[in-house]
Amino acid sequence: MTRPGRLTFLLAGVLAAASGRARAADAPPPPGWYSTSGLSYVMAAGNSSASSLGFKAEVKRLWPKATFTFAAAGIRADASDVARRAVGTPDSFQVETGPHVLKAEKYNAATAFDRRITDRFGWTVGAEYDRDRFSGLNSRTLGLAGVNYLLANRKEFTFKAGLAATITHQSEVVPDPTTKDTFPGLRLSADAERKLGANSTYVGGVAVDENLQDTDDLRVRFGNALAVSMNKRLALQLGLLFLYDHQPSLVALPLFDPAGSPLGLDVAARAATLDTTFTVSVVVTFAPHAATP
């Protein structure tokens, strides 16, 4: 088995272990609007200058046999590079703050509509958008249509597996003549949500995207979130996101000589295959008290 294949099965196994054993379905959550949102901002000034912004939001509408979901997330961080510098001569100089330089920036948005044909089997359509210039990606838009099977749908536990056909269009920071910008694909996915005691909830999802025109171009998205309720509306949430790209995009890197001096040139190189994002945030949750028609 190839390394991407082993990674896929490993991630799916971790998700399945966290979800636990499926039992007969209980009454599903009441229909209505649900939302979860979180925002974080950090700023440092003085001897160092840096700032970071992060946000995450999800809106969900439940009906007896259908679900609409919209989610968006992003992070942005910049810092002065260098933090402080002296400009002038050794005998006469002024201390200045270096120019602000973007250090990290990535955005993601996704929407989906699920419709159940039976209590367990259904179809889904959706779309996604990604932007991460540090990974060589100006933008990636993906549309999907497929089927899913609801293995469990209880108040304390839901688990769903899916298979979908996809069409992807992407724009890269550094054009790669060996790849195509638009291509069909196939997605395998699994999503779980489980209550852990009275105040904690785990939400996890893994999606494996295969490029049908180039099978070496395989991507895995494995997201995890653990929320601990502080009161009815507020919760402390820990998030861990893994993004694996077996054939990453090209990025432009500054070239230095062996002594470490810049040559004023950029060279094209592959981005790293694995990106990891860890977040800690306070989230606000809204949910209906009773069934909404």
Image (spheres, rainbow, N blue to C red):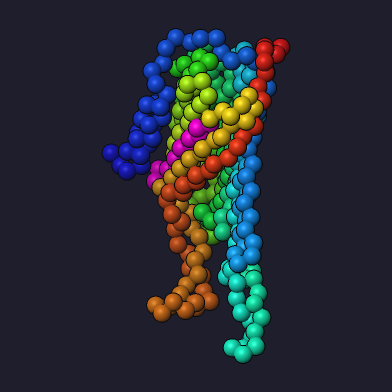
Q: Which residue sits furthest left?
A: 1
| Pick the front one: 115 or 258 | 258
Rendering coords of residue 188 (x, y %): 45, 31
Quadrant for the C terminus, please: top right
Rendering coords of residue 96 (x, y %): 65, 74
Residue located 62% across and 63% down the image:
49
Up/down of 55 relative to 187, above or below: below
Rendering coords of residue 74 (x, y %): 60, 45
Residue 117 can be seen in this image: no
| Pick the front one: 166 or 127 | 127
Instruction: Name the dominant secondary structure of the magenta segment.
Output: strand
Q: Is residue 281 left or right of residue 12?
A: right
Magenta stretch holds residue 217: yes
Magenta stretch bounds:
212-227
Residue located 53% across and 76% down the image:
264
Magenta stretch holds residue 80: no
Up/down of 221 relative to 145, above or below: below
Q: Is residue 208 left or right of residue 66?
A: left
Up/down of 48 relative to 123, above or below: below
